[in-house]
Amino acid sequence: DIVMTQSPLSLPVTLGQPASISCRSSQSLVYSDGNTYLNWFQQRPGQSPRRLIYQVSKRDSGVPDRFSGSGSGTDFTLKISRVEAEDVGVYYCMQGTHWPPWTFGQGTKVEIK
Amino acid sequence: QVQLVESGGGVVQPGRSLRLSCEASGFTFSNYGMHWVRQAPGEGLEWVALIWYDGSNTHYADSVKGRFTISRDSSKNTVFLQMNSLRDEDTAVYYCARAYRMDTAMVPDFWGQGTLVTVSS
């Protein structure tokens, strides 16, 4: 199974400042079709997860453009250009290349300083 | 609007069974595979099972294989998770989530609000 490792696990951020979350996979996530199926989810307190990013860098409908994804192979990053209060929550990366199973990172908790 | 509404959670003793349901609305159910993903209290997300859009194939996490069964009823736009031989470690919020059938990665793109299953004597 593919192991997804996130860092940091806790990220205190000042409002208006940038934030960055790293995700590494135990194997390359490049699929035979040339695409890389790395996704990012946001889980706000008391809510269900919401997909933000798919295929490394494609934003889902309605996701603010302050969220961006990047990376390749085994190393990926989610960036928030300017953190807002509504961004508080836990962020998970998830791979969809080598399934089953679909595997998630441990989660990174973003909070306001 | 797209909705996934889970039900059937509750408190159950170890070794007993429970059946979860997830009713879908607001989209063409037959175009989507359906996942179950769980989250133990205070923990992260763990994928549990997937059923293909047409019900022709299923996949399970090793932790539930042989104990849980995923199924779907297209006439009712509903997916089920039959959970047998429940263990303490199955205690979690169970989410259903859809995945578009043309998506190679079958990634969940919309999730329900979840239903809590507590396994305790």
Image (cartoon, rainbow, N blue to C red):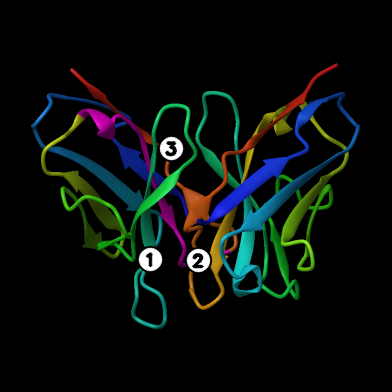
Residue type at mark 2 is His
**Front residue of this view, candidates B21 and A11:** B21
* Side of A86 where B45 appears, left or right: right
| Pointer 3 or 2: first along the chain | 2
Q: CA distance from mark 3 to mark 2?
A: 18 Å
| Pointer 2 or 1: first along the chain | 1
**Number of other residues with Cα within 10 Å of mark 3, as a class: few under 14, some 14 to 19, many 20 or more:** many
| Helix, strand or loop for disc 3 | loop
Count of numbered badges drawn on the protein: 3
* Side of B74 where B47 appears, left or right: left
Please say if the residues under marks 2 and 1 sit with CB atoms less than 8 Å apart. Answer: yes
* Side of B41 where B71 appears, left or right: right
Residue A29 tag number: 1
Residue indicated by mark 3: A106
Residue type at mark 3 is Gln
**Front residue of this view, candidates B32 and A56:** B32
Instruction: Name which quarter of the figure residue A72 lies in.
Output: bottom left
Q: Chain of mark 3?
A: A
- Residue B80 placement (x, y as % from top left): 77, 53
Residue type at mark 1 is Leu
Residue shown at the point (42%, 44%) measured from the top left: A105
Q: Which residues are drawn in magenta?
A: A85-99
The residue sitting at the left extreme is: A17
Question: Height in image: A64 above or below B98?
Answer: above
Residue indicated by mark 2: A98
Q: Are marks 2 and 1 on the same chain?
A: yes
Q: Is residue A87 magenta?
A: yes
